[in-house]
Image (spheres, helix red, strand yellow):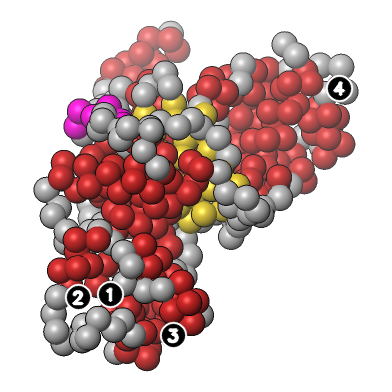
């Protein structure tokens, strides 16, 4: 057993659980100096009893400390990053991997799968010889045709992703500089797309759509840096998200209403109502209008500035926008994985801490919610004690 690797795993799992060394040492009945030497790999040896106490304190199997986690080692992760440091990136990646790891653990425990999963990325991708803007529009049109969406607004982008590809989607608490994470488990052929909780609901929708573009193009699992020069793949996925969420035909159809569109003039109010209709940000709708030659570049620049919240208050949907902000601040577990986890909890295959991790809540809160709807773990029934037989046996031994 490589004691240095064991120490690194203990430190990683301790940080994941949110314990400092003093907390974990107390829980595992060790002194803090002893735990420090174990984590640094300088102690002469670690007994199985000590590892067992550490594993219990961390609520993980002992094998994760002795042998590592093959799921975390094989999963490929891409992060959509706005200038985060390495520590924030590690926190975000670990959060997504916790969810993927639980899904794999449920497989081993024999938890039932609620439905057959569709393979990801089966739509024919556009000719790579086309300009990236045209590739993006073509693929967005194909997605809408596949799901028979026409040119209407999309209600739930995350549900669209699950229906189209079979990938899992989630909204998690991530560092503010991380917009989203995509994690692919190649062995189990599963994909998890997560976006962070935030105050801008249209940004969540756009990030989901952007990551769907990467998934459909299968353009590799890499870190997507959003600062500085954008890669062609990034610009293509941004264009895909624009065309998917606010299709040109839908914009033309909406503008055909004379009440909003007179003499070919697009004013701020018209553009704001368009953004509201398709539930995209104001800059996204301005870019679409410019690409359709309905706005000049100068007109677009003059309109840029107000936030979605400011426009909502100005043009009459402020209260509705506040409700959407509240929803976008809340975590949402992957529906398929959460369904499996609740069933595994009911069968007493996993504890409530795993469910709480998925839901982003405290264990006692998750347990209380389950109890309210009558969901309890099926604990083994105690064996019935035959008292007469025990008394008779005691008398026999006393003779």
Residues at marks 1 and 2 touching, judged by CB atoms closer than 8 Å: yes
Point 32% across, 78% down: residue: 271
**Structural crowding at the residue carrying mark 1, measured as other residues with C-alpha within 10 Å and reported as few (<14), some (14–19) or many (≥20):** many
- The residue under label 4 is 43
For the residues carrying marks 3 and 2, which lies nearer the camera in this image? 2
Per the rendered image, the range of residues in magenta is 115-121
For the point 67% across and 39% down, which residue is it? 14
Tell whether 1 sits left or right of 273.
right
Q: Residue at x 61, y 21 (%)?
A: 68
Of 336 and 223, nearer the camera is: 223
| Residue 142 appears anywhere in the view | yes
Comparing 7 with 298, the one in front is 298
The residue nearer to you, when weighing 230 against 29, is 230
Q: Is residue 117 magenta?
A: yes
Crowding at label 2, few (<14), some or many (≥20) Cα neighbours within 10 Å?
A: some
Closer to the camera: disc 1 or disc 2? 2
| For marks 4 and 3 on the same chain, the one whose residue lies earlier in the sequence | 4
Residue 219 shown in magenta:
no
Q: Residue 274 placed where, x, y %?
A: 27, 74
Q: Which mark sits nearer the N-terminus, 3 or 1? A: 1
Q: SS at mark 1?
A: helix
Image position, residue 316 (x, y; %): 29, 89
> Which residue position holds label 3?
310
Q: Are marks 4 and 3 in contact (CB under 8 Å)?
A: no
Residue 274: assigned label: 1
Residue 307 appears left or right of 146 = right
> Circle 2 is placed at which residue position?
255
Point out the frontmost of discs 3 and 1. 1
Q: Is residue 255 above or below residue 139?
A: below
Question: How far is the residue under mark 4 from the one under mark 3?
Answer: 59 Å
Q: Nearer the viewer, mark 4 or mark 1?
A: 1
Question: How would you classify the magenta stretch by its main secondary structure?
Answer: loop
């Amino acid at each position: 057993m490589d004691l240095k690797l064991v120490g690194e795993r203990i430190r990683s799992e301790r940080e994941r659980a949110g314990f400092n060394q003093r907390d974990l040492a107390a829980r595992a009945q060790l002194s803090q100096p002893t735990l420090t030497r174990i984590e640094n790999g300088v102690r002469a040896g670690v007994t199985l009893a000590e590892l067992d106490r550490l594993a219990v304190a961390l609520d993980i199997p002992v094998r994760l400390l002795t042998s590592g986690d093959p799921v975390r080692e094989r999963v490929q992760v891409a992060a959509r990053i706005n200038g985060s440091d390495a520590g924030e990136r590690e926190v975000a990646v670990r959060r997504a991997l916790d969810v993927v790891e639980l899904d794999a653990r449920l497989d081993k425990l024999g938890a039932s799968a609620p439905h057959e999963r569709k393979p990801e990325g089966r739509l024919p991708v556009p000719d790579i010889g086309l300009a990236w803007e045209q590739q993006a529009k073509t693929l967005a049109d194909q997605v809408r045709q596949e799901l028979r969406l026409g040119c209407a607004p999309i209600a739930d982008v995350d549900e669209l992703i699950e229906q189209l590809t079979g990938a899992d989607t989630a909204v998690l608490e991530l560092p503010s500089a991380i917009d989203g994470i995509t994690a692919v488990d190649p062995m189990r052929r599963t994909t998890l797309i997560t976006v962070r909780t935030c105050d801008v609901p249209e940004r969540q929708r756009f990030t989901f759509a952007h990551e769907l573009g990467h998934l459909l193009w299968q353009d590799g699992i890499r870190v997507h840096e959003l600062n500085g020069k954008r890669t062609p793949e990034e610009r293509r996925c941004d264009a895909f998200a624009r065309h998917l969420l606010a299709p040109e035909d839908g914009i033309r159809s909406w503008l055909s209403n004379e009440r909003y569109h007179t003499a070919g003039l697009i004013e701020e109010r018209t553009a704001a109502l368009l953004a509201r209709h398709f539930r995209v940000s104001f800059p996204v709708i301005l870019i679409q209008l410019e690409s359709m030659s309905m706005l000049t570049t100068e007109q677009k620049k003059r309109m840029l500035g107000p936030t979605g919240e400011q426009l909502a208050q100005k043009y009459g949907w402020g209260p509705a926008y506040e409700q959407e902000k509240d929803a976008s601040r809340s975590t949402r577990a992957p529906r398929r994985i959460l369904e499996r986890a609740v069933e595994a909890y009911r069968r007493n295959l996993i504890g409530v801490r795993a469910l709480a991790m998925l839901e982003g809540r405290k264990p006692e809160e998750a347990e209380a919610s389950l109890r309210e709807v009558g969901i309890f773990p099926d604990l083994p029934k105690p064996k019935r004690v035959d008292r007469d037989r025990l008394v008779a046996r005691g008398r026999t031994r006393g003779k």
